[in-house]
Image: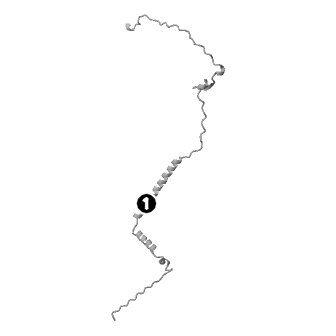
Amino acid sequence: MYPEHPAHLPAERAVTVHQPQPLSPYDPGPSVALDPYGERQAVVWVPDAYGRMVPMPKHLAPAPILPPEPRDLTPLPLLDPVAQRFMGAGLGGGALAAGLGYGVGEIVSAAAGISGGALVWIAVIVLALRTPARAISGGKGSTVNIRKAVIKRNHFHD
C-alpha cells in the first residue's frame, strides 16, 4: 500500500551483547557478637501514621506527651475592666459636654429673650431687697427720733 522507503528499514549492523562481570559472593565481613539478652534496649510500641502499633527502641521513641495544666475556668467579665473604664469616661465626658452645652444655650436664649417687662420686674426685685427692714415690718422696732430745730431770726438793725 505505501511504498517502502529505505529510511524506514531496520539498520543492518552488528549487534553487541553486553556480558556483565560475574559477581563475587557477598562477604558479610567480620562476625559481630550479638548483645546478650540483658543488654538489649527496651522496646516500646508506638502508633505509626496509619494507627497501627509498631515496635521501636525506647531511646528512639518520641517523648511522651505531658498532660496539659488545668485551665482556669472561672467566668471572665463581659467587658474588660480597662475597656469599662474607658467607656465610662467617654459616656461621662459626653454627658458633661451635653449638659454644659444645654446650660450655656439656655443662658444665651434667656439673655436674648429679656424684654422691657422683665427688666421692670428685675428693678422691682432689686428695690425690694434694698428697702430697710422697718418699712417691711410696719414700723415696729427700735426707732430713734432725732429732732433738729433750726431757729432763724432776722435782725435788720432795730
Residue 28 place in picture, x, y as percent: 58, 13
Q: Eyeballing the image, is 93 above or below 73?
A: below
Tell me which residue sits at (66%, 21%) in the image: 38
Q: Which amino acid does label 1 sit on?
A: Val
Assign the N terminus to one quadrant of the image: top left
> Considering depth in this image, is 93 or 142 the residue closer to the camera?
142
Q: Is residue 3 visible?
A: no
Tell me which residue sits at (46%, 73%) in the image: 129
Residue 139 place in picture, x, y as percent: 49, 80
Q: Is residue 82 visible?
A: yes
Helix, strand or loop at mark 1: helix
Left or right: where 91 falls relative to 53: left
Q: Mark 1 points at which residue?
A: 104
Tell me which residue sits at (64%, 21%) in the image: 39
Disc 1 crowd rating (10 Å Cα; few below 14, some 14-19, many 20+) is few
Q: Eyeballing the image, is 19 above or below 156?
A: above
Residue 128 place in picture, x, y as percent: 45, 73
> Considering depth in this image, is 157 or 110 the residue closer to the camera?
157
Q: Eyeballing the image, is 128 above or below 82?
A: below
Quadrant in the rendering for residue 73: top right
Assign the C terminus to one quadrant of the image: bottom left
> Considering depth in this image, is 59 or 3 the residue closer to the camera?
59
Give the total of numbered labels: 1
Residue 141 place in picture, x, y as percent: 51, 79
